[in-house]
Amino acid sequence: MSSLRIPSRRPQAGFTLVEALIAMVILSFGLIAVTNLMLVASTSNTVANQSTAAASIASQRMEQLKSLSFTDAGMTAGGDLTTDTTGFFDDIQLPGVGMVHTRWQVTDVDPTTKFIVVRSEGTGVLAGPRSRAEFTTFRVQNPT
């Protein structure tokens, strides 16, 4: 009796071409998602920088206006800023942040009260209104 030997099949080692292509497609989608994530993070960082700068500048301008005497509160702080028909304005270029536009207006409510509004915002394409900071206060004249 002779025994027939059937050659054993060895499992193939490695990947087929289809498996390699599928892996490349999955990797491509993963890289696209990571790239998009980096773009969104960069945009958010720019807006956050301009928002912080706008809030800081608006706060400084409000403090300058509040520190003026009551009779000078309608004037520009220091007299070095220009005016237009809607109030006073100032553009400040900050390194690493860009241009921040600040506008303020002092309105007489009555002879003893003034209303002060200060608004700052970044002028970048991505930031614009998303970086706006606005502060308001009333200023009342102390009785003498």
Image (tube, rainbow, N blue to C red):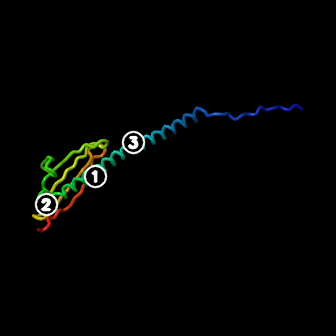
* Of the two numbered discs 2 and 1 in the rendering, the one whose residue sits closer to the viewer: 2
Position of the N terminus, as image quadrant, is top right
Pointer 1 local density, CA inside 10 Å: few below 14, some 14–19, many at least 20: some
Characterize the local packing of mark 3: few (<14), some (14-19) or many (20 or more) Cα atoms within 10 angstroms. few
Which residue of the protein is positioned furthest toward the right in this rendering? 1
What's the CA distance linking mark 2 and mark 3?
48 Å
Q: Which mark is residue 107?
A: none
Q: What secondary structure is found at the residue carrying circle 3?
A: helix
Residue 39, x across and y down, in percent: 39, 42
Q: Is residue 9 above or below residue 43?
A: above
x, y percent for residue 34: 45, 42
Contact (CB < 8 A) between labels 2 and 1? no
- Hey, what amino acid is under mark 3? Leu
**Which residue is nearer to you in this view: 89 or 10?**
89
Q: SS at mark 2?
A: helix
Q: Nearest to the eye among marks 2 and 3: give it.
A: 2
Q: Nearer the viewer, mark 3 or mark 1?
A: 1
* Residue at 36% across, 46% down: 45
Q: Is residue 97 visible?
A: yes
Earlier-in-chain disc, 2 versus 3: 3
Would you name the residue on which mark 1 appears? 56
**Is the C terminus in the top left, top right, bottom left or bottom right quadrant?**
bottom left
Dot 1 amino acid type: Ser
Identify the secondary structure beneath mark 1. helix
Give the spatial CA distance, label 3 vs label 1.
Answer: 26 Å
Q: Read off the residue under disc 2.
A: 70
The answer to whether 101 is drawn above or below residue 68 in the figure is above
Circle 3 sits on which residue? 39
